[in-house]
Amino acid sequence: MSKSITLNMQITTGDPRPIFKQIVDEIRIQIARGELPVGAKLPSVRGLALQLMVNANTVAKAYNELNNQGLVESRQGLGLFIAPQRQRLSDAEQQQKLQQALATFVNEVAYLDYSKQEVVAAVSDALHRLETAATSNGE
Amino acid sequence: MSKSITLNMQITTGDPRPIFKQIVDEIRIQIARGELPVGAKLPSVRGLALQLMVNANTVAKAYNELNNQGLVESRQGLGLFIAPQRQRLSDAEQQQKLQQALATFVNEVAYLDYSKQEVVAAVSDALHRLETAATSNGE
Amino acid sequence: MSKSITLNMQITTGDPRPIFKQIVDEIRIQIARGELPVGAKLPSVRGLALQLMVNANTVAKAYNELNNQGLVESRQGLGLFIAPQRQRLSDAEQQQKLQQALATFVNEVAYLDYSKQEVVAAVSDALHRLETAATSNGE
Amino acid sequence: MSKSITLNMQITTGDPRPIFKQIVDEIRIQIARGELPVGAKLPSVRGLALQLMVNANTVAKAYNELNNQGLVESRQGLGLFIAPQRQRLSDAEQQQKLQQALATFVNEVAYLDYSKQEVVAAVSDALHRLETAATSNGE
DNA sequence: GTGGTCTAGACCACT
DNA sequence: GTGGTCTAGACCACA
């Protein structure tokens, strides 16, 4: 029996994203960072639901989403496991996702009293914080 | 009687933003760019609803939002007008909006296969395009 | 206000497919046949749930699936609409789906006492029946 | 004591079929091909479980299924043996199995961009490959 | 024990 | 009224 990884994450109630999306995003990021190695077993639906104090269906929905995206694969009766890489998103899709996120962001920020430089700097900062977060709490 | 400005915009159905938000954003941006001068009269709710082919309630909601934010002001029985500048958003509020948008953006982009540099460059580009768009189609 | 199309379909309890999958498949087939024209409005979640005597969440799950696959797009507060075509599945994906279905089928049939000819004839028949079903009840 | 045959097979994790079904199918096919002669002794539950690296209960379930279908028979304390032919499935049952498999297959393929001819050809191919596979690796 | 499906009923944002 | 999300609790197939 292979033991599940423990996910360290938590739900933010102030977050505009629905709970299941927060879970999806967090796991996706941890996979991208390499914190969740291929073949690792995710916590059980019920287990993660308990940990996050969320309904099991909500976790199941998140897991289902990850499954659809090919990031994770379920083995019947055993659980969910991090899937081997294979091209997870085509270049075109990635490009589209980026443009999409970019548009939303710019629309949200355009009318604020910040100069282009200030905004770019803020983005750079935020990305930097994200990268270093991995090393600081990962171990 | 002062004639209403004609708003130069259109609704995108593929857009993840709700319709009323698209309207709010567009007007906000046009104000920020100076395309809508202080004191200018906005189209009537019904007029804009017709022009954009959306429900009148939706336009009303957008106008209401703009009113709450102090960007426009209603004069009894006359319509909505672009409000004079005065500090429209406190520094704290601006800061919060930026952080909020930043978080959403980063969450959306983190797991894509782009380097920090690429993302920052893309943001810079997008902001640049926005600025120059103002001068090119503004007149 | 655009009126919804009425879907003529029904849930089969003997079917090994879960209910939501039956709904997805049926709508997918009707789209493929051209019975549901681009831009047509699907029945509301609650409406179809009533019609099929199924829980609303189940219909919602089916609609969600169709949405993910890009066959349908939701307009906030208005409903679900048949999406314009754009390449819905890459050739490689289609090929893979076919091979997948083929494998399952062959595995199910291989040990039965039918000759290759009989099986092929049966498949041909089944496909033929499917095609003609469109014209007979579609109008 | 008669020595068990060694089964020539392996479990595929990507396969949508549950593991026990993969075992059942594989053995069924090998019987149909005549690779497993009547009276031959199957590996023990534990033995096959070890070989395939799956849970013993899973193998037991597969064996149980084969037993129910009359393809194998257990001799008290000796093990499982390939049963003599006698009519293993009634015509009606065979017919039903075929129709069932057909329906699933057609539902899966109907909305793909393949012509009837292409699908039929693909089926014919797949069946052909199956038959020839028997002679090539059977010895 | 695992995930997957379904029901019932509630709340929310948007139109 | 529309879809989307969440909770609670049930049942099923699989390992």
Image (cartoon, coloured by chain):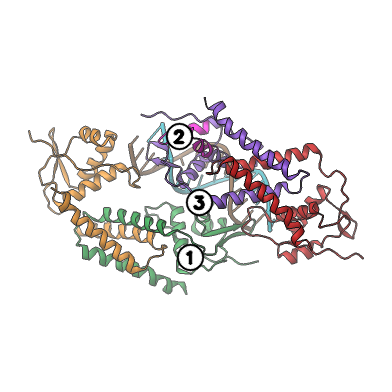
Chain colours: A purple, B red, C green, D orange, E cyan, F brown
Q: Are marks 3 and 2 in contact (CB under 8 Å)?
A: no
| Residues packed near mark 1 inside 10 Å, few (<14), some (14 to 19) or many (20 plus) | some
* Residue depth check, mark 3 versus mark 2: number of the one nearer the observer: 3
Decide which of F11, B117 is in the foreground and name it. B117
Left/right placement of residue D80 relative to residue B38 reads left
- The mark that comes first in sequence, 3 or 2, is 2
Q: Residue at x 92, y 65 (%)?
A: B1
Q: Amino acid at mark 3?
A: Asp
Outermost residue, right side: B1
Decide which of D42, B92 is in the foreground and name it. B92
Q: Amino acid at mark 1?
A: Ile
Write down the quadrant of residue D99 in the picture: bottom left
> Which span of residues is magenta-colored?
A26-50
Q: Are marks 1 and 3 in contact (CB under 8 Å)?
A: no
Q: Which residue position holds label 1?
A: C31
- Given the image, what chain letter belongs to the residue carrying mark 3? A
Which numbered disc covers residue B121? none
The stretch drawn in magenta includes residue A29: yes
Q: Is residue A18 visible?
A: no
Tell me where residue B76 appears, x and y as whole percent.
90, 57
Q: Which residue position holds label 3?
A: A91
- Given the image, what chain letter belongs to the residue carrying mark 1? C
Left/right placement of residue C109 relative to residue C87 reads left
Q: Which residue position holds label 2?
A: A42
The stretch drawn in magenta includes residue A135: no
| Residues packed near mark 3 inside 10 Å, few (<14), some (14 to 19) or many (20 plus) | few
Tell me where residue C53 appears, x and y as whole percent.
49, 56
- Given the image, what chain letter belongs to the residue carrying mark 2? A
Q: Quadrant of the N terminus of chain D?
A: top left
